[in-house]
């Protein structure tokens, strides 16, 4: 049998997955309180296929590197998941209770993935061309945040020449909640009096990125003609996002 995993991030929504026989999971983006009634959430899994499916749900802590690449680490100690493994009959719905069990006093927001992964169980679909068994296994990677005690939105930027003689701009989340760099605009002022506004190509994948608490993203670019001869740079940034509790 050939098994193929299809990863469905929360931002993708439910794109034509029913035609592939996939299950559905909701909600895709959740904010927890560290204590009280809102420290627990209920997720709904719908198996609208004609075959039973097996599902496993885990929690992962989110991190992001300087270039905007996300990486995760298993975090079973932060959440209680009931049930964590299940078999869902065809045309059936399963409710899953997920409760935050981490520290109650949070000076800064915590960011997680609640990951629902389909594991091998059904017979799969017969490939007419090869006669092999093919099973599509779907993975939902949803966003989960745990609200801090105080909401502070603060982002700072610095810029300097790196060892290669290029300009490296670093954007750091110094606040207590994540910030989405939507419609990001970056302007550099050099000590030569020049001004340069970064293009979308300059910013690359950093534009629109999710800047998690205590994380830093960087933009590296060649020194533009407008800033030639400058040794010190002052970055000015703006973006269109406001945290909503």
Image (cartoon, rainbow, N blue to C red):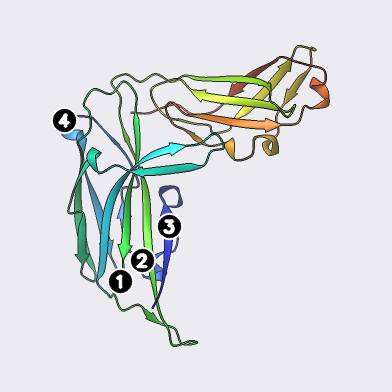
5 on left or right of 181: left
Residue beneath disc 3 = 7
Q: Residues within 10 Å of mark 1 (few under 14, many from 20)?
A: some
> Which label's residue is closer to the chain start, 2 or 4?
2
Q: Give the quadrant of residue 189.
A: top right
Question: Height in image: 170 above or below 43?
Answer: above
Residue beneath disc 1 = 49
The structure residue drawn at horizontal position 26% and vertical position 58%, both measured from the top left corner, is 56
The circle on residue 36 is 4
Residue 10 at x, y percent in the picture: 40, 48
> Which label's residue is closer to the chain start, 1 or 4?
4
Residue beneath disc 2 = 22
> Which label's residue is closer to the chain start, 2 or 1?
2
Discs 1, 4 touching: Cβ within 8 Å: no
Q: Secondary structure at mark 2?
A: loop
Select label 3 or label 4 by which is in front. Answer: 3
Residue 97 at x, y percent in the picture: 18, 47
Between 106 and 49, the residue placed more toward the observer is 106
Q: CA distance from mark 3 to mark 2?
A: 11 Å
> Which label's residue is closer to the chain start, 3 or 2?
3
Discs 3, 4 touching: Cβ within 8 Å: no
Quarter in which the N terminus is drawn: bottom left
């Amino acid at each position: 049998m050939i098994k193929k995993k299809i990863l469905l991030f929360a931002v993708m929504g439910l794109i034509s997955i029913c035609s592939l026989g996939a299950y559905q999971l909701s909600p895709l983006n959740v904010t927890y309180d560290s204590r009280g009634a809102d420290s627990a959430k209920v997720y709904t899994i719908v198996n609208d296929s004609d075959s039973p499916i097996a599902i496993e749900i885990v929690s992962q802590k989110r991190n992001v590197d300087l270039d905007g690449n996300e990486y995760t680490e298993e975090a079973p100690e932060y959440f209680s998941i009931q049930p964590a493994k299940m078999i869902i009959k065809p045309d059936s719905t399963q409710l899953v209770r997920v409760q935050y069990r981490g520290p109650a006093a949070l000076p800064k927001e915590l960011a997680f993935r609640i990951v629902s992964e389909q594991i091998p169980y059904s017979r799969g679909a017969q490939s007419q061309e090869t006669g092999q068994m093919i099973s599509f296994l779907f993975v939902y990677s949803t966003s989960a945040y745990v609200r801090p005690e105080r909401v502070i939105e603060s982002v700072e930027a610095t810029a300097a020449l790196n060892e290669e003689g290029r300009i490296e701009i670093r954007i750091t989340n110094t606040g207590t909640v994540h910030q989405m760099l939507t419609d990001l605009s970056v302007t550099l002022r050099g000590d030569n009096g020049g001004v340069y506004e970064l293009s979308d190509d300059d910013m690359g994948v950093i534009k629109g990125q999710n800047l998690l608490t205590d994380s830093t993203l960087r933009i590296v670019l060649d020194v533009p003609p407008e800033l030639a001869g400058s040794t010190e740079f002052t970055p000015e940034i703006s973006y269109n996002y406001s945290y909503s509790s």
